[in-house]
Image (cartoon, helix red, strand yellow):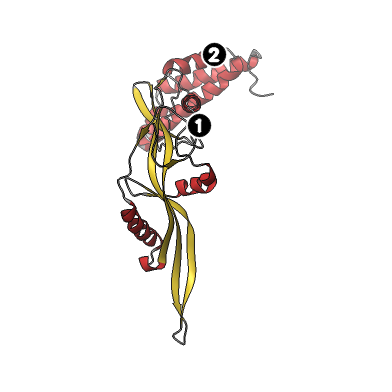
Amino acid sequence: MQLGKLSFPVQFSEVDVRELVKGLIEEQGWEEYEIQKPELWFFPYWVFNYNSFSEQVDEAGVKSTQEGEQGIIAMHGKSSELEDTVGDLFSSFENDLLTKPIVEHFKAVRFRIRRQEAEKLTRLKIAARLSIDPEFVVISGLKQVFVPVWKTNASFDGQEMEFMVNGVEGNILSDEAVPDRGKTAGELAGETVSDLKKPGNWIRYLVSLIGSIIGFFWHVGVGEGERKGILHNRGVRLLILLIIVILILLNETGTLVLWG
């Protein structure tokens, strides 16, 4: 199958895409997931050079032309959006463009913007970006080029995400990041039980408990009078005394050294 136009070389394979997506998912703690077979797509772009100018008038009324911004940029051949990254890609791979992709199966999005339309649009869009009159913009070297992009979906925990990967350099094009899985209640409980097997960790949990109780009373909208009532409550005072006794006993037995 041929595209009929130049294309960037596909240097990032299907296997590479799977490994990249797998790594992104596992970095966020996901263990059970499914990655669909990646599909290779070719997206159309008009790549071109642009030069901008400005006109100056001196005190004597003499006009002169000054050079402004210049560069290589691309416009999507269907949506007409400007994309600097494709222009940068062209600068790096201009001598490696192919007339036929070295892959057997792929899909392609066709050009909807014709050359005559592209010449007008690119000039107007650059002028709008630079906030200058289109008269001071020159477009040259307009070329049709296809950019390879791998697309795949991954499923985990009842949700599905689409991944888009540049087929030339392998960078992620998707905007959405893989969410952090976090730890389940069972995993957190297991870690807590494991920690409590070490007496040295008890103080940390007890101090955290006391801090949480005090923080709750002070930050949930309990009034000052109510706080005093709670702190003078017999049950609360007994709980605090019990915690203090436990800490003293641990220190006396040498299980936990609180002070020298």
Q: What residue lies at 40% left-to-right and 27% top-to-bottom?
A: 105
The tag on residue 12 is 1
Please determine whether, in this image, residue 51 is positioned above or below residue 105: below
On the question of residue 190 being in view, the answer is yes
Where is residue 111? Give x, y as percent. 33, 44
Q: Nearer the viewer, mark 2 or mark 1?
A: 1
Residue 207 left/right relative to 257: left
Amino acid type, mark 2: Ser
Amino acid type, mark 1: Phe
Where is residue 143? Give x, y as percent. 42, 50
Q: Which residue is mark 2?
A: 194
Give whichever of discs 2 and 1 has the lower sequence position: 1
Query: 216 or 142, which lies in front?
Result: 142
Mark 2 touches mark 1? (CB < 8 Å): no
Query: 210 or 9, which lies in front?
Result: 9
Q: Residues within 10 Å of mark 2 (few under 14, many from 20)?
A: few
Which corner quadrant holds the C terminus? top right
Query: 205 or 113, which lies in front?
Result: 113
